[in-house]
Image (cartoon, helix red, strand yellow):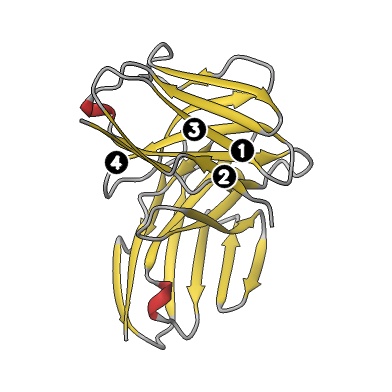
């Protein structure tokens, strides 16, 4: 069973700040997902990573397979980035995702 | 990008009634669909994995006779909550895996169920 830990659980920052959310897992994986869930509930898939780094707009996701660790960065944060960010991993050979507990991000204007 | 829809987005029903939730992949074929439920301020909990044309695989502790899942086509899966009770009130989310990109998984907008 894979244990997925996210930190911090809650994060409040001012608009414009650089944000980092961390995710660690315990067992080798085939892929790691970063998801965003807004207060309305809908979930958006931000990134799927199996190695290296991906960038989309102001969002950057990195993964270190050897260290079993991933980070999600948000540059020039904005109040509309306020949401819960969820890390999820798929174990090798498995169908289902294992979810972290989520990081609740609040960006104040 | 790929879109997954759910219908209805909101449902309020009386205790004892059955509720059907539809999950559709709108512009791709999904061999596998997942059904999750989420309680307030908690993470998603996988209920079952549904493969097209075969019986769903339920997670431990999820009653298969209570939560009926049908995955009749590559674009449609349904979850029926039978004889719903107030403790079934929750946020139900489906997710679909793309046929030709097995690591890609798209999530629906969710269905909020309130049982009175």
Please determine if labels 3 and 2 lie on a single subunit: yes
- Tell me which label, 4 or 1, sits earlier in the chain: 1
SS at mark 4 in the image:
loop
**Chain containing mark 4:** B
SS at mark 1 in the image:
strand
Q: Which residue is mark 2?
A: B5
Q: Which residue is mark 1?
A: B24
In the rendered image, residue A32, in percent from the top left (x then y), is placed at 57, 51
Q: Who is closer to the viewer here, A43 or A34?
A: A43
Q: Quadrant of residue B17?
A: top left
Question: Can residue A94 be spotted in the picture?
Answer: no
- Tell me which label, 1 or 3, sits earlier in the chain: 1
Q: Who is closer to the viewer here, A58 or A94?
A: A58
Residue at position x 68%, y 34% in the image: B75
**Chain containing mark 3:** B
The N terminus of chain B lies in which quarter of the figure? bottom right
Q: Quadrant of residue B57?
A: top right
Q: Which mark is residue B35?
A: 3
Please determine if labels 3 and 4 lie on a single subunit: yes
Q: Which residue is mark 4?
A: B39
Mark 3 and mark 4: Cα distance apart in space? 14 Å
Please determine if labels 4 and 1 lie on a single subunit: yes
In contact (CB < 8 Å): disc 1 and disc 2: yes
Q: Is residue B116 left or right of residue B23?
A: left
In contact (CB < 8 Å): disc 3 and disc 2: no
Question: Can residue B9 be spotted in the picture?
Answer: yes
Check disc 2: other Cα within 10 Å, few if <14, some if 14-19, many if 20+: many
């Amino acid at each position: 069973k894979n244990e997925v830990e996210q930190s911090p659980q809650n994060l409040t920052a001012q608009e414009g700040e650089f944000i980092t959310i961390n995710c660690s897992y315990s067992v080798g994986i085939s892929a790691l997902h970063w998801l965003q869930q807004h207060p309305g509930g809908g979930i958006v898939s931000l990134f799927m990573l199996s190695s290296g780094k991906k960038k989309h707009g102001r969002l950057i996701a990195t993964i270190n397979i050897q260290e079993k660790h991933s980070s999600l960065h948000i540059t020039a944060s904005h109040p509309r980035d306020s949401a819960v960010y969820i890390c999820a991993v798929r174990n090798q050979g498995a169908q289902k995702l294992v979810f972290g507990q989520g990081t609740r991000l609040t960006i104040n204007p | 990008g790929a879109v997954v829809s759910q219908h209805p987005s909101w449902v309020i029903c009386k205790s004892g009634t059955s509720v059907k939730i539809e999950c559709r992949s709108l512009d791709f074929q999904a061999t596998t669909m997942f059904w999750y439920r989420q309680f307030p301020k908690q993470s998603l909990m996988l209920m079952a994995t549904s493969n097209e044309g075969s019986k769903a695989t339920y997670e431990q502790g999820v009653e298969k006779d209570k939560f009926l899942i049908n995955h009749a086509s590559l674009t449609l899966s349904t979850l029926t909550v039978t004889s719903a009770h107030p403790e079934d009130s929750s946020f139900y989310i489906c997710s679909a895996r793309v046929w030709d990109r097995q690591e890609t998984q798209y999530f629906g907008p969710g269905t909020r169920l309130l049982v009175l």
